Amino acid sequence: MKLLITILFTFSIIIVHSQNYKLIDEKVKNYPHFNQIDDLVEHVNNEFNTDTEKVRAFYIWTAHNVTYDLNTYYSIRPPVLELIFDSESINKSIENQKRKKLAKQVFKHRKALCLGFSSLFSELCLKSNIEVELIEGIIKRTVDNIENPHYSKNHAWNAVKINEQWKLIDVTFASGFEDRNSGGWVQQFNNFYFFTDPEKLLSSHLPEKPEFQLISEPISTKAFFKLPIYYAKYFESGLELSHYQTGTVYVSKQDDKIHLSFKTKKRNRTIYYKFNNENKLRKLSLTKNNNDVYVAVLKYKSNRSKGLSLYYDGEKILDFKVKK
């Protein structure tokens, strides 16, 4: 009887927790237009009590009200001259002033690059006395980045401290994605990037500071660039890559075939694939070998294709670099 009560109590907590998020989300989506950051912060602080609720509100508001600025992203911008002083406090003060200025610009124009998204989110949290970090680091954007030693910081996201625990958030990725066909930004909310499991986020995001990997044994930059490009939908696909499957797949010289290996797969989950010079998706067939590894064997038909993509439920889940 005690066990049954415990199970029911735990289940009720889970339901209430998810319902709270739903209520928060609906409230924030219906907020009026705010002209000042402080007005939004005051509204959120008056309406919600816990830091988790406030962080959720700021996450939802930013993801639904700020658009990624593709015009600025693709424009040619002059290099920014940064002055670095010997004093850490002076450098920190300069960074804070830049963040505040950028946050105001983003709030006013409702457009931003990733640094603008994370700067605004940081400012909202700080004004609510929530400990937050702006994390700069690396993401792999194309298959050319796989096993490429030439890299630089190209993305920014956040971590917030809730009940003495750091939680990871990427408001930019939560807000939508670029449609490669139309060249426009699609405002489509993605909840995967709220309090994302550190190991899952690390599949696509490598922080400049290893401590913000938030795992017991941080991976190296070299190991990160050996991985394929992961997308959020991968974690719903039921697939799990084998430990020795890297982001580069090699075409066999004998029979022009490519082998992919997976540790696990779920039944009734259909995965598709296509090479980057093709339009048609093909069903991925997996066979379990003697080592309990699921293997897919694909015929490589074109020397021009340098990328291979896997799809689940109409969305991309993995990108591999193809080498012959």
Image (spheres, helix red, strand yellow):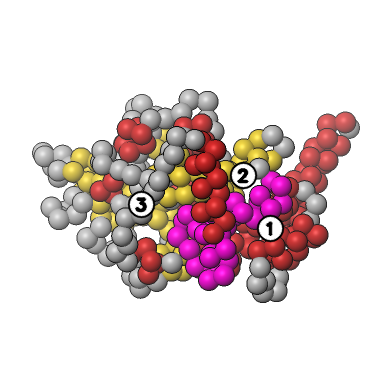
Instruction: Please name the amino acid that badge 2 sits on.
Output: Val
Q: Can the viewer see residue 76 in this picture?
A: yes
Q: CA distance from mark 1 to mark 3?
A: 35 Å
Where does the image place residue 2, in percent across and percent down from the top left?
Answer: 88, 31
Q: Is tag 1's residue or tag 2's residue first in the polypeptide sequence?
A: 1
Q: Secondary structure at mark 3?
A: loop
Q: CA distance from mark 1 to mark 2?
A: 15 Å
Q: Which residues make up the magenta segment? A: 102-130
Of labels 1 and 3, the one closer to you: 3
Determine the residue positioned at 69% across, 34% down.
164
Q: Secondary structure at mark 2?
A: strand
Residue ID for mark 1: 57
Q: Look at the image and say whether residue 2 sits in the magenta stretch.
A: no
Task: Identify the disc placed on residue 171.
Answer: none
Q: Main secondary structure of the magenta part?
A: helix
Residue ID for mark 2: 132
